[in-house]
Image: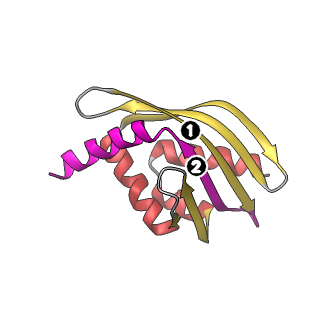
Amino acid sequence: MSEQLVVRFFAALEAGDIAALREIYAPDAVIWHNDDLLEQPVEENLKVLAGLHRVVSGLRYDVIRRVPAPDGVLQQHVLRGRLPDGAEVALHAAMYLRVGDGHITRIEEYLDSGQRATIKAARERMAG
């Protein structure tokens, strides 16, 4: 069950389906990243993900491994796509996705902060 939900989650991420992501997240879910150590609420995370889709075209996740855990799933992947200037994105990351009552309740994401900074800079350039 957890793995099916995680597969659905990443399919919604790739499609930029914010409504589906909102349904998959528990209302009080939190998303934590290793580069800022902050716990982000769902709505704030959804804004970031919508912005990611505005700046990265052809967004996809190449899964390296996905391992069931007692309360969720561990996944290692590479987020790939293209920035507006044509540069390729290859953001290596690992995630622990906790699942409860059919929803993602917590994500802990460990990522390459240098690549994340490149994406953030492109998003800021687009915002003007």
Residue 93's disc is 1
Residue 127's disc is none
9 lies above or below 64 = below
Q: Residue furthest bottom?
A: 28
Residue 78: image quadrant is top right
Q: How many marks?
A: 2
Image coordinates of residue 69 in percent, x first then y, are 81, 48
Q: Determine crowd level at label 1: few under 14, some 14-19, many 20+ residues with C-alpha closer than 10 A.
A: some
Image coordinates of residue 96 in percent, x first then y, are 68, 49
Q: Determine crowd level at label 2: few under 14, some 14-19, many 20+ residues with C-alpha closer than 10 A.
A: many
Image coordinates of residue 114 in percent, x first then y, are 40, 37
26 lies above or below 67 = below
Q: CA distance from mark 2 to mark 1?
A: 7 Å
Dot 2 lies on which element?
strand
Identify the residue at image location x=43%, y=53%: 49
57 lies above or below 126 = above
Tag 2: amino acid: Glu
Q: Nearer the viewer, residue 75 or 37?
A: 37
Instruction: Identify the residue under disc 2.
Output: 109
Tag 1: amino acid: Ala
Q: Is residue 41 magenta?
A: no
Q: Are marks 2 and 1 in contact (CB under 8 Å)?
A: yes
17 lies above or below 75 = below
Dot 1 lies on which element?
strand
Which comes sooner in the sequence, label 2 or label 1? 1
Magenta segment: 100-128
